[in-house]
RNA sequence: CGGAACGUGGCGCAGUCCGGUAGCGUACCUGAAUGGGGUUCAGGUGGUCGCGGGUUCAAAUCCCGCCGUUCCGACCA
C-alpha cells in the first residue's frame, strides 16, 4: 500500500478530548475517528487491526468446534421480554422509536431463540455458536475511547449442553481458547475468578489487562496467580495489636464532633485508635457494623456476611435504635447485633461513640466490653497485604476486562422454553454458557501495553502492516526506483508493506513511521544506496543497521519470524 | 443521573474579565530552495466564533435557555 494514496490522517498534536494512551494513539495514528460520544468509526488502518484480531479469535473458536453466525442487531422487543431483560437492562438497552425493536446489547435471547424447538435431543448437543458482531449499549458515560463505547464489536459465543458436566467441558474449552487468543495477540493478561453477578449462573472468569484506564479494581498475586475483584478479594491482614493494659472505660464530652476526622482532631489521637460505627438494617433487624477508623466498609462483603437485604438506617431510626445521632454511635451498650471487621479482632483501648449524642468513649476493650461481637472480613484488600493462597504480597490495581466466560446454566433456556429430551425421554432446559471478548478492547489494551513516547509499537501479529518502507527523497530517481523494486519484491515475498512514497522531509516520515509503529522500518536513502545498502530499523528496540540490498529479504524474514 | 471544565478554520490555542473590522501556530494549496529525525522563504484557500433567544447603535465577548464533548462520581451482562 502506498501511503500517498492511503487514507491515514495522522495528527501531530494530541486531540483535546483524548486522555488515555490508547485513545490518543488510535486518533493520532489515524486508526479511528469519533462520530459521537462512545461511537467510533474505524478507518482503514484501524480496521486492518480489528480484522486481524477477529481472525485470531475466529481460528481459535473454530478450533474448539465453534460455528460462526451472523445475527441481527435489530431485535423484536418481545423476545427480550421473555427473559425479562428489557427491565433488567433498563436504560442501557437502546429502543427503536418508530417500531417495537431494540438494538441488541448481547445475544443470549437470539441464540436461545434459534436453539428452541430445534435442538430437541441430547444427541444434538454439544453445540458452540458464536458471532463477531456490533453490540449496542446506551452507556451513561462512555469513556477512554473505544474501551467503553455505546457501540462496540464483540465476539460472543454460546454453548448448549445436555448437562452441567458437559457445560463444564464447553467452559473449559473456551477457557483454553481464550488463553490461546490472548497469548497469540501478545497481551499480558491475568484471569480473575468473578462472582456470577447479575447474569445469573454458577461460575465465571474474567480475562483482565492491567491498566490505569481500567474500570475494575482487582487484587492480584504475581507469585501464585491469585486474582480477584477487590469487591470479593480476600487478603491476610494483621489485626490491630492488642495493647498489654486495657484502660478503663471513660466517657468524654465531644460537642458537635460527628466524623472520625473531627474526633481525631479534637482528642489529638490517630484514626487507627478509633472504631467507626455504621448502623444498617438487615431484613428489618438493626446491626452495628464496626470498622477501624481509617478504613471503609466493603458493601459486597458486608452483604455477603449478613445475607438478605441490607440498607443504611435512616437518621430517625438511628436515634431510636442507639439513643444517639449518627456521629455518636458505638458498640458499648448497643442493644442489637454487632459485627466488626477482622482487623479489629479483640482490640482494646479504642475510641468510639457513646450512644449518647455529643459523647464518645475511650478505653473500649472489645473482648471485655462488647460480649457477643462477631468478626467478619468487611474491608477491601489493599496493596501489600498477604495473598491467602501463598502468602506473598498482593497488588491492587485497575484493570480492563477483555473477556468474560460464563456458565449460564438454564436461566435463558428455562425462561424461553428451550428444552430437550434426555436419554429417558424427560424434558430439561438446555444448559448454556456464554463467552464474550471485546474486540476493540484487545486493540486498545495492546496499545496500552505497547507504546512509547513516539507512538505505537505493534508486534507482527496485530500490526496492520509488517513493514513501513520509507523512501527518503522522492525527487531522486534512483531512490524511487530502488524503493519501488524493494516494495514489489517484499510484497511478492508475502509481506504486508506500507510504502511511504510521499514527498516529505525525512524527519516527517520517520516520525510518522514511529507513530504508526510497524515492527520493521526499511529506509532507502541516497547515500547508502550508493553503497548498495539500505537501513532496517526495529521499532521495538530502536535498533538500526545497514544491510546489502540483496540480503534484505533474508534479513527481513529473520527479523519477522 | 449528580459535580466540574470546555466548545473560536482539519488539529492545538489566544481573544471573552473591560462589547467596536475574527487572530496565532500547525495542517492544506501554489512557487522556490532543501533533502537522514516534524527544514526554510514568499504568496494563498478555509471560520454560521456549538445552537436559539434577549440586551445594545454594535455581541465570539454581557444575560437567559438548550445542545455537544471531556473528566470525577453513581451505574455497568
Image (cartoon, rainbow, N blue to C red):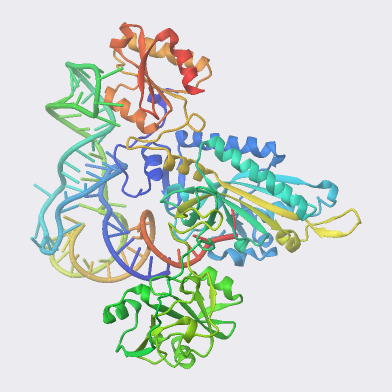
Would you say A104 lies left or right of A352 here? right
In the rendered view of the protein, which quadrant contains the N terminus of chain A? top left
Q: Indicate whether A538 appears above or below A423.
A: above
Q: Is residue A297 left or right of residue A410?
A: left
Give the residue drawn at x 64%, y 35%: A59
**Residue A241: percent from left, percent from top:** 42, 71
Image: A158 above or below A302: above
Q: Is residue A137 visible?
A: no
Q: Nearer the viewer, residue B1 or B63?
A: B1
Residue A200 visible at all: yes
Query: What's the residue at 51%, 42% (across, down)?
Result: A442
How many numbered discs, if any? 0
Observer-nearest of A131 and A241: A241
Q: In this view of the protein, which residue sits in the foreground, A297 or A18?
A: A297
Name the one closer to the observer, A462 or A352: A352
Rendering quarter of residue A100: bottom right
When the figure is inspected, residue A243 is found, relative to residue A315, above or below; the finding is above
Residue A221 picture location, percent across and down: 50, 51
Q: Residue at x 40, y 30 (%)?
A: A540
Amino acid at each position: 500500500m502506498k501511503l500517498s494514496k492511503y487514507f491515514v490522517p495522522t495528527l501531530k498534536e494530541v486531540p483535546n478530548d483524548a486522555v488515555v494512551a490508547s485513545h490518543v494513539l488510535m486518533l493520532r495514528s489515524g486508526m479511528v475517528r469519533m462520530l459521537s460520544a462512545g461511537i467510533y468509526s474505524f478507518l482503514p488502518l484501524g480496521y486492518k487491526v480489528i480484522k486481524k484480531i477477529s481472525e485470531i479469535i475466529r481460528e481459535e473458536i473454530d478450533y474448539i468446534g465453534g460455528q460462526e453466525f451472523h445475527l441481527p442487531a435489530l431485535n423484536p422487543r418481545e423476545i427480550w421480554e421473555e427473559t425479562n431483560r428489557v427491565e433488567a437492562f433498563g436504560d442501557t438497552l437502546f429502543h427503536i422509536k418508530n417500531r417495537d425493536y431494540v438494538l441488541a446489547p448481547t445475544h443470549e435471547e437470539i441464540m436461545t431463540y434459534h436453539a428452541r424447538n430445534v435442538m430437541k435431543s441430547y444427541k444434538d448437543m454439544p453445540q458452540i455458536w458464536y458471532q463477531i458482531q456490533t453490540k449496542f449499549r446506551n452507556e451513561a458515560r462512555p469513556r477512554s475511547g473505544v474501551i467503553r463505547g455505546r457501540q462496540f464489536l464483540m465476539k460472543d459465543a454460546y454453548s448448549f449442553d445436555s448437562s452441567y458436566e458437559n457445560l463444564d467441558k464447553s467452559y473449559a474449552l473456551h477457557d483454553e481458547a481464550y488463553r490461546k487468543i490472548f497469548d497469540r495477540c501478545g497481551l499480558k493478561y491475568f484471569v480473575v475468578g468473578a462472582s456470577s453477578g447479575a447474569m445469573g449462573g454458577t461460575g465465571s472468569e474474567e480475562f483482565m489487562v492491567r491498566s490505569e484506564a481500567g474500570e475494575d479494581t482487582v487484587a492480584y498475586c504475581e507469585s501464585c496467580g491469585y486474582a480477584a475483584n477487590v469487591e470479593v478479594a480476600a487478603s491476610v491482614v494483621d489485626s490491630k495489636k492488642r495493647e498489654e493494659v486495657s484502660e478503663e472505660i471513660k466517657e468524654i464530652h465531644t460537642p458537635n464532633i460527628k466524623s472520625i476526622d473531627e474526633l481525631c482532631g479534637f482528642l489529638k489521637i490517630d484514626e487507627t485508635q478509633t472504631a467507626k460505627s455504621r448502623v444498617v438494617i438487615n431484613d428489618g433487624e438493626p446491626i452495628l457494623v464496626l470498622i477501624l477508623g481509617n478504613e471503609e466498609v466493603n458493601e459486597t462483603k458486608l452483604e455477603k456476611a449478613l445475607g438478605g437485604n441490607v440498607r443504611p438506617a435512616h437518621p430517625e431510626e438511628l436515634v431510636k435504635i442507639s439513643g444517639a445521632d449518627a456521629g455518636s454511635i458505638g458498640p458499648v451498650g448497643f442493644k442489637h447485633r454487632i459485627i466488626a471487621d477482622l482487623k479489629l479482632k479483640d482490640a482494646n483501648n479504642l475510641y468510639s461513640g457513646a450512644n449518647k449524642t455529643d459523647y464518645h468513649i475511650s478505653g473500649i476493650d472489645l473482648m471485655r466490653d462488647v460480649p457477643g461481637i462477631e468478626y467478619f472480613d468487611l474491608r477491601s484488600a489493599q496493596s501489600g497485604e498477604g495473598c491467602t493462597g501463598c502468602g506473598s504480597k498482593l497488588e491492587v490495581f485497575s484493570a480492563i476486562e477483555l473477556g468474560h466466560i460464563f456458565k449460564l446454566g438454564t436461566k435463558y433456556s428455562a425462561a424461553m422454553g428451550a428444552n430437550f429430551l434426555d436419554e429417558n425421554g424427560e424434558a430439561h432446559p438446555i444448559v448454556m454458557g456464554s463467552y464474550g471478548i471485546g474486540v476493540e478492547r484487545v486493540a486498545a489494551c495492546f496499545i496500552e501495553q505497547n507504546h512509547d513516547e513516539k507512538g505505537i509499537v505493534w508486534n507482527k501479529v496485530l500490526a496492520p502492516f509488517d513493514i513501513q518502507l520509507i523512501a527518503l527523497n522522492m525527487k531522486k530517481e534512483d531512490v524511487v526506483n530502488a524503493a519501488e523494486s524493494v516494495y514489489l519484491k517484499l510484497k511478492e515475498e508475502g509481506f504486508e508493506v506500507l510504502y511511504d512514497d510521499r514527498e516529505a522531509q525525512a524527519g516527517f516520515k520517520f516520525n510518522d513511521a514511529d507513530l504508526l509503529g510497524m515492527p520493521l522500518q526499511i529506509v532507502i536513502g541516497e547515500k547508502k544506496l550508493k553503497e548498495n545498502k539500505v537501513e532496517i530499523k526495529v521499532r521495538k528496540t530502536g535498533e538500526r543497521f545497514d544491510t546489502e540490498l540483496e540480503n534484505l529479504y533474508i534479513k527481513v524474514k529473520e527479523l519477522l519470524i
